[in-house]
Image (cartoon, helix red, strand yellow):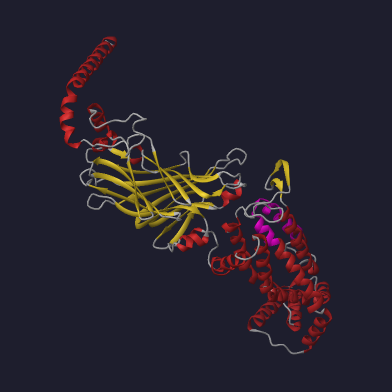
């Protein structure tokens, strides 16, 4: 019974196939005349000048009725676009003096974006988009039940001039007067171009019951010598809620009321902005560098998805697209909150960079002969401004050094009574007018400045490919020797600026921590160990960092050492400090509320301890 059933099914299949073949032969004989009559009123005449490549490559004409029927069967109303001469994989180029863009007929999106005035570390032109690393797509459904993607459909390009602006119109047509249009407007000297999405006459074509979504994806090309260093500053940033910013370095995120999304690649950035905020946005960033020896082309992959709102059945969005350098001055001039893309630090750190260091460095570099000298001069000025803080810190350390013999006596006298030892030590500090905390507070005051500069130098676009001394690029690491092997966390090269900076910070720590070094108390960190570890960590950490940052730290510590030597040998006299302390100890000293409360608590604790005994 089973074999018979299979034979019947096979027979039915053959009959069906034969019937379909006969129907297709019949349609091929009768269809041309019918279709030609229907298409006669919609025939589009395209001159060779409008499509210069149409004679070189085969194209489908509207009068090709079989192609029309096939396109309409596959694409519905949008089958019309597949019958035009533009329905072939050609590109249209628009450019100004800083940017060159190539736009595909298929998909209507930018397939190549080249920055004319910049080169990569190995002298190759900087491309933000090339060879399929980016895509742009609108997904929608139609009233006849189809789900279509614009990236698979053919747009018709038209290039015009509007004054000095170059205008490229890419139309995905349903008929000659009904279409979905991408409109690119490129202005002279601008990295930012106008971009709009609008539809005309598609109110009966779009299925308003289903969502229309827009997707933008990009894989960031490597542009710098150190891919790990570049990847550290490569991230997806978006603005939401009318002015708040967030970022995604690796993973996914979602937010509402999106006004722009930026794919930042350290020194270059691709940004999509909208005048009409997207209701929601989904974002994804994926690290593509697992092995720096193998994964050397791309840094990270970015993806964003937004819903598009139909109004009256039509699309109408005015947007902007930016392809250019991650330069604070350029981004800030657009007055679109794009300066937040730059990692200048949060809160007071970012404020210091925006309003002090960036303008000041721009001023210095405008007349000094090199950016390296500008860094040195800027460092000198910063250290001079902070020298009063350095003086207070060193004065506190000098006082502690003078008191060291008396503190050692207390330690020995009350070695079996920690509570009493602490109490007597605080009394000594109070009488002498000294405090270990008075040396820490000035150091803490310098942290905002140091951290702001730590953020400033890696983000300073002006340093890119600018040399100084043996460093050929202050925005990347300098190399004095190439190693035949790779050291974990260090790299395959030796950089001189980090070595100099590490030596300088070691000498500085010897002058500060070393002069007051004492045996570590139980549970307290070993300061001698930290003194040796810190320069070593700096040596490893900064070997792959920007040489401009290492130059700053080397110069800063060198100047600080000089200032401290002047303070120690010219300004501060330890004998006078000792005499002043002895004089202070004779004077009655009023305790503050906090000190008095602490002393009372310690005395109570001591009494309780005695009671237990």
Q: Position of residue 73 (x, y in %)?
A: 24, 31
Res. 221 visible in picture: yes
Q: Position of residue 607 (x, y in %)?
A: 71, 78
Nearer-the-camera pick, 137 or 170: 170
Residue 307 vs 347, above or below: the answer is above
Q: Position of residue 30 (x, y in %)?
A: 17, 22
Tell me where residue 90 sits by quadrant.
Answer: top left
Highlighted range, magenta: 530-553
Left/right placement of residue 338 relative to residue 538 reads: left
Residue 389 vs 302, above or below: the answer is below
In the image, residue 376 lies in the stretch drawn in magenta: no
Nearer-the-camera pick, 293 or 531: 293
Residue displayed at 46% across by 47% down: 100
Q: Quadrant of the C terminus?
A: bottom right
Res. 206 visible in picture: no
Q: Quadrant of the N terminus?
A: top left
Residue displayed at 26% across by 38% down: 78
How many numbered tags mark residues here?
0
In the image, residue 544 lies in the stretch drawn in magenta: yes
Residue 193 vs 426, above or below: the answer is above
Tell me where residue 379 sits by quadrant.
Answer: bottom right
Q: Position of residue 190 (x, y in %)?
A: 45, 56
Q: Main secondary structure of the magenta part?
A: helix
């Amino acid at each position: 019974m089973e074999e018979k059933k299979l034979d019947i099914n096979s027979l039915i299949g053959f009959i069906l196939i034969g019937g379909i073949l006969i129907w297709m032969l019949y349609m091929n004989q009768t269809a041309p005349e019918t279709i030609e009559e229907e298409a006669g009123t919609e025939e589009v005449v395209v001159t060779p000048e409008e499509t210069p490549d149409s004679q070189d490559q085969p194209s489908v004409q509207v009068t090709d009725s079989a192609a029309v029927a096939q396109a309409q069967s596959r694409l519905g109303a949008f089958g019309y676009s597949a019958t035009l001469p533009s329905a072939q994989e050609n590109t249209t180029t628009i450019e100004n003096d800083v940017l060159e863009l190539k736009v595909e007929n298929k998909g209507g999106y930018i397939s190549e974006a080249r920055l004319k005035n910049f080169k990569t570390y190995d002298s190759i032109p900087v491309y933000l988009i090339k060879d399929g690393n980016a895509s742009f797509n609108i997904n929608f459904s139609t009233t006849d039940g189809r789900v279509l993607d614009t990236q698979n459909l053919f747009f018709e390009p038209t290039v015009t001039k509007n004054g000095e602006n170059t205008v490229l119109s890419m139309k995905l047509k349903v008929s000659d007067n009904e279409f979905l249009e991408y409109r690119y407007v490129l202005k002279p000297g601008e990295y930012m171009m106008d971009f709009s999405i609008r539809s005309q006459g598609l109110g009966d074509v779009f299925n308003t019951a289903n969502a229309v979504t827009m997707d933008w994806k990009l894989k960031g090309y490597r542009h710098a010598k150190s891919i790990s260093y570049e990847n550290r500053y490569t991230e997806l940033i978006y603005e939401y809620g009318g002015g708040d910013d967030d970022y995604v370095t690796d993973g996914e995120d979602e937010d509402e009321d999106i006004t722009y999304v930026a794919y930042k690649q350290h020194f270059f950035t691709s940004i999509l902005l909208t005048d009409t905020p997207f209701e929601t946005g989904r974002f994804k960033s994926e690290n593509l560098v697992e092995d720096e020896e193998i994964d050397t082309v791309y840094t990270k992959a970015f993806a964003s998805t937004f819903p598009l709102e139909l109004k009256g059945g039509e699309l109408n969005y005015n947007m902007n697209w930016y392809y250019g350098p991650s330069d604070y001055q350029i981004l800030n001039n657009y007055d679109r909150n794009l300066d937040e893309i730059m990692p200048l630090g949060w809160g007071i750190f970012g404020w210091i960079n925006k309003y002090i260091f960036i303008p000041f460095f721009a001023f210095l570099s405008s007349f000094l002969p090199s950016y390296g000298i500008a860094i040195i001069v800027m460092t000198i000025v910063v250290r001079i401004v902070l020298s009063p803080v350095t003086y207070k810190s060193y004065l506190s350390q000098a006082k502690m050094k003078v008191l060291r013999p008396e503190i050692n006596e207390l330690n020995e006298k009350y070695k079996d009574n920690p509570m009493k030892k602490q109490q007597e030590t605080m009394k000594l500090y109070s009488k002498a007018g000294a405090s270990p905390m008075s040396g820490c507070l000035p150091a803490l005051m310098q942290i905002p400045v140091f951290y702001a500069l730590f953020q400033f130098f890696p983000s300073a676009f002006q340093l890119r490919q600018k040399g100084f001394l043996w460093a050929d690029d202050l925005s990347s690491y300098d190399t004095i020797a190439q190693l035949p092997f790779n050291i974990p966390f260090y790299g395959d090269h030796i950089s001189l600026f980090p070595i100099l900076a590490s030596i300088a910070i070691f000498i500085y720590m010897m002058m500060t921590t070393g002069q007051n070094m004492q045996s570590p108390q139980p549970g307290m960190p070993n300061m001698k160990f930290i003194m040796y570890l810190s320069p070593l960590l700096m040596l490893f950490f900064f070997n792959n960092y920007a040489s401009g940052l290492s130059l700053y730290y080397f110069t800063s510590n060198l100047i600080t050492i000089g200032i401290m030597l002047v303070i120690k040998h010219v300004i501060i006299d330890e004998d006078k400090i000792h005499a002043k302390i002895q004089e202070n100890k004779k004077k009655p000293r009023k305790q503050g509320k906090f000190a008095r409360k602490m002393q009372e608590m310690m005395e109570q604790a001591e009494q309780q301890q005695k009671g237990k005994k």
